[in-house]
Amino acid sequence: MSALLAGGRLDVISGEAARDALSHQRTELLADRLAPYLGPGLLTLEGPAAVPASPEDIATALQKRVPVPGRIRGNMWAVAQYIESHRHRRTLKKLMADVFAVEPTPSAFHRFLAGLPIGLVVDSWYDGALVAAMIEAGRTDVVDVQGQSRAAIGESRWHRGFDLLGRSTEPDKARTLLYRPHGGMRPDGDVLVSDSDYVEVLTEIDIQTPIPEEVRARRATRGFLFLGCRFHDQMLRTYARQILKRSAGPHACVAEATTLTVNERRFLAAEGILLLDLPLAEAAQILAG
């Protein structure tokens, strides 16, 4: 079925048709014509997550550690900014490390992805479940490129590359490029999380400079498959839109249609992203085979 929305048509496939479409997505994934775009929803595939699995969860965890004004409670970016402004950046970094102190156990789906020698994976969350799965798989051909807060660390670079042992490296010769646009908690934890972290990025993201050149090159021959992602906040939509820019397509998103907000539906429609109306756990089983 399809739903008409202002600014475009949201194409939605449900039931058996969605399962058939996902089987095709699996073929494209295995042929390296599709890049997975992962969100924190994957952390709950096999039970409750050991770490926050949404921006709202992070806000709640930080609020338990530092009292914040009621008007910003529940807003991760604003809560992080309040802590940074009133308690210093070092405190925010320490609290984020505490919140993510438990390393999530990789799911079967993480392990499936970790074994694929595909060219590009985008992971939009801060945890290291996929990195842990890649280490378990013995991968030595992966470079983990993380967005970083330039203002916080006093560097001019928008991002930094690491091998799976946390050593600095460059992404151009990686078999698999793992791109984490918002950063990762390990090895350095210089993540984008507060409002001020994004000020510089958002001033230039339209001209793509914060996005690694190697990511831009690899997306040119691939579409994206969104898994475990939500786009209910403008920040999340802005990043996804810019990462999609100039990619080959086509794109699809796995989500249950009834859970989506109006803004999420509009975003998917505007970007021409096919909605596969399936539970994430079922989709993960189909993709893993």
Image: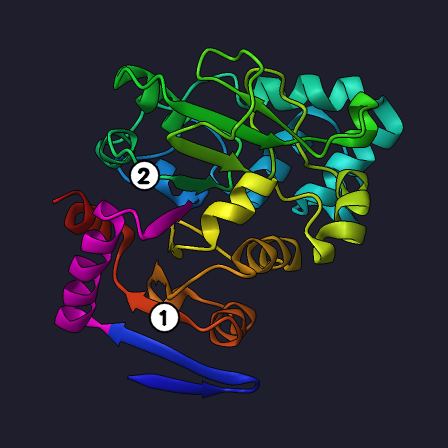
The stretch in magenta equals 14-37
x 68%, y 51%: residue:
208
Find the residue positioned furthest to the front: 173
**Looking at the picture, how far across and down is residue 80, in whole percent?**
73, 35
Q: Is residue 131 magenta?
A: no
Graded by Cα atoms within 10 Å as few (under 14), some (14 to 19) or many (20 or more), the crowding at tag 2 reads many
x 83%, y 30%: residue:
151
The amino acid beneath tag 1 is Leu
Q: Which residue is mark 2?
A: 118
Question: Which quadrant is the N terminus positioned in?
Answer: bottom left
In this view, the residue in front, 101 or 273, is 273
x 46%, y 46%: residue:
218
The mark found on residue 101 in the picture is none
The mark found on residue 274 in the picture is 1
Work out whether mark 1 precedes mark 2 in sequence or the reverse, and give the earlier one: 2
From the viewer's perspective, is residue 22 above or below residue 174? below
Colouring scheme, one of rainbow, by chain, secondary structure, one colour:
rainbow
Answer with the quarter of the image where residue 174 lies: top left
Graded by Cα atoms within 10 Å as few (under 14), some (14 to 19) or many (20 or more), the crowding at tag 1 reads many
In this view, the residue in front, 149 or 265, is 149
Answer with the quarter of the image where residue 207 lies: bottom right
